[in-house]
Image: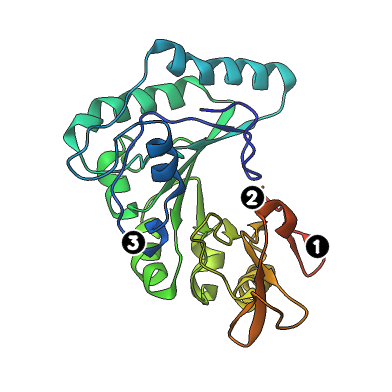
């Protein structure tokens, strides 16, 4: 959990628990799994237990809600960076119910529920066809194959805001048919970490252009550890004919064709 999160597209992060199971190529180099292992939490995998938290942890979003109400400015909460709210395990049901109650108690917070399991969202969420307006439901689409699988599942959920996380972007996406009627926001970014896979800059440009054409807000989060190089130099590699060089995430920055894309849904 973190107040004033360093993730560019949220204000805070909240984890109802820690732990998950990898389900698609985007999970291959999961930063959350690496972080859990670094702090000695063995919570990854189908047979591993999940890590839960006490009352002080669950009280923090209520404080953020009071602060947001006092300031008159809504805050966004990314839930969950270290888990998947819709992982289908029965011991998580009581914690999902507790999360739903917390969401209802914090109307000044917009809860961004990002899942790789949109097919389970409707069944495991308690809201039926009447989702709270402060719940934004998102799913990860890293390749076209996963977009075609997950987009119909996401579109079927009556969330007030539906969004996509195309991070790490592992292939070119064609989303135009889905953007205007079903998707309200797109986040894109490259992978970071010691085993980061590069993304072709043209993939990001194509996604940005589709969002612009559909008038869907676009957020470019980061290049990750691979950025376009002016020419093929020592240590560089090519992807789709474009030279890419590995640098630190900070040095790579988050400008796409000289611009910062920080758009948000209305």
Residue at 28% x, 48% y: name it. Answer: 21
Q: Looking at the image, is mark 2 or mark 1 nearer the viewer?
A: 1
**Foreground pick, 57 / 247:** 247
Q: Could you tell me if residue 82 is visible in this image?
A: no
* Disc 2/disc 1 C-alpha distance (Å): 19 Å
What is the residue that sits farthest to the front in this orientation?
234
Q: How dense is the environment of label 2, judged by Cα within 10 Å: few (below 14), some, or many (20 and up)?
A: few
Residue identifier under label 2: 265
What is the residue that sits farthest to the right in this orientation?
258
Residue 51 point in image, percent of width and height: 31, 27
Q: Quadrant of residue 129?
A: top left
Residue identifier under label 3: 24
- Asked whether the residues under the numbered discs 3 and 1 touch, taking CB atoms below 8 Å apart as contact, a structural biologist would say no
Q: Is residue 165 left or right of residue 44?
A: right
Residue identifier under label 1: 259
**Foreground pick, 6 / 98:** 6
| Mark nearer the N terminus (2 vs 3) | 3
């Amino acid at each position: 959990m973190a107040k004033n999160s360093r993730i560019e597209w949220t204000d805070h992060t909240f984890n109802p628990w820690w732990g998950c199971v990898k389900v698609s190529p985007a999970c291959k180099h999961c930063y959350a799994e690496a972080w859990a292992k670094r702090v000695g939490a063995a919570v990854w995998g189908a047979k591993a237990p999940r890590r839960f938290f006490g009352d002080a942890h669950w009280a923090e979003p209520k404080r953020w809600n009071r602060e947001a109400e006092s300031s008159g400015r809504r805050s966004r909460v990314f839930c969950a960076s270290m888990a998947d709210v819709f992982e289908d395990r029965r011991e998580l049901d009581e914690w999902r119910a507790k999360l739903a109650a917390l969401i209802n108690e914090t109307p000044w917070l917009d809860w961004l529920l990002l899942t790789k399991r949109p097919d389970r969202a409707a069944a495991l969420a308690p809201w039926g066809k009447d989702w709270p307006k402060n719940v934004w439901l998102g799913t990860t689409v890293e390749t076209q194959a996963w977009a075609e699988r997950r987009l119909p599942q996401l579109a079927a959920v009556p969330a007030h805001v539906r969004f996509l996380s195309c991070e790490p972007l592992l292939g070119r996406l064609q989303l135009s048919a889905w953007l205007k009627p079903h998707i309200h926001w797109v986040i894109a970014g490259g992978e970071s970490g010691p085993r980061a896979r590069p993304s072709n800059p043209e993939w990001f440009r194509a996604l940005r252009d589709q969002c612009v054409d559909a008038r869907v807000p676009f957020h470019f989060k980061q290049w990750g550890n691979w950025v376009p190089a002016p020419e093929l130099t020592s240590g560089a590699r090519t992807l789709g004919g474009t030279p890419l060089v590995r640098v630190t995430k900070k040095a790579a920055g988050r400008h796409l064709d000289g611009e910062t894309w920080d758009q948000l849904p209305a």
